[in-house]
Image (cartoon, rainbow, N blue to C red):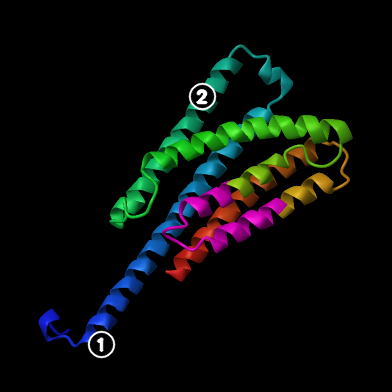
Amino acid sequence: MASPSAMTPEQALQTVASVRAYREGLTSRAAGIVWMVWGVTLGFMLLTSMVYDFADEEVRQGPWWPAAIGVGILANLVGIALGGVLTNAVWKAHALEGEGLPPPWVAFAAAVVFILAFIGLSVALKAALYNVVRMGFNYAPLLLFGSLACATMAWLLRGRSAARPGLIAAGAVFVAFVVAYAVPLEWDYGMQMAGAVLFCLLDVLAFFAVGIRLSRLG
């Protein structure tokens, strides 16, 4: 490569363009990894919560149940912490922190807000919809949660990666949420459990699909 002083204006522009393209590709791959990190994190937290939701009534009455709930809460907090640490580590490894990205604490705050929002959302939807019509999947809010999570990730990373894949995933998962509530299914314990696990996996799949797409764009 010619030295900077020996470059023609055209060569300098080509060099700048190639560096910019390389940097944009690197950023897109980093964003893809971040999406997959949070796909694993959310999947772990949601599936862990299912263990407690579907525990047998005899188990719930056991003397160790309060301690088990504490362990579950601690596991979710650890999951949030690991997700935030890995997210910030990815940006740091790519030397992209502070360049149009949210501050490091945003990764932790967003996860906490979404968990609290999901709890409130689940209670509200079950009271307003499921407990009234007694039809559809009781855990359909898991899909709405996944849709909102995808949309939020796309918005938070809009300055560093294409938002379209995340928004498409959010729309697809939202459609699945509507279908899950509209399907004329009578309440059945086994079916509800299968649906809950499926919805968790669909949320994870949505995050991984976006992550893989962004990685390929890079």
Figure check: 192 above or below 18: above
What is the spatial separation of the Cα atoms under label 2 and label 1, in whole angstroms? 62 Å
Q: Circle 2 — which element?
A: helix
Tag count: 2
x and y percentages locating residue 118 in the rendered image:
62, 35
Magenta-drawn segment = 149-174
Horizontal side of 165 relative to 177 (left or right) equals left
Q: 54 or 27, which lies in front?
A: 27
Q: Residues within 10 Å of mark 1 (few under 14, many from 20)?
A: few
Whether the residues at callouts 2 and 1 have beta carbons within 8 Å, the answer is no
In the rendered view of the protein, which quadrant contains the N terminus?
bottom left
Residue at image coords 46%, 54%: 157
Precedes in sequence: disc 2 or disc 1: 1
x and y percentages locating residue 141 in the rendered image:
70, 40
Horizontal side of 112 relative to 105 (left or right) equals right
In the rendered view of the protein, which quadrant contains the C terminus?
bottom left
What residue type is disc 1 on? Answer: Glu
Residue matched to label 1: 10
Residue 68: name its quadrant.
top right
Residue at image coords 44%, 53%: 34
Q: 47 or 3, which lies in front?
A: 3
Q: Residues within 10 Å of mark 2 (few under 14, many from 20)?
A: few
Q: 99 or 64, which lies in front?
A: 99
Residue at image coords 42%, 41%: 106
Horizontal side of 193 relative to 94 (left or right) equals right
Residue matched to label 2: 71
x and y percentages locating residue 38 in the rendered image:
49, 47
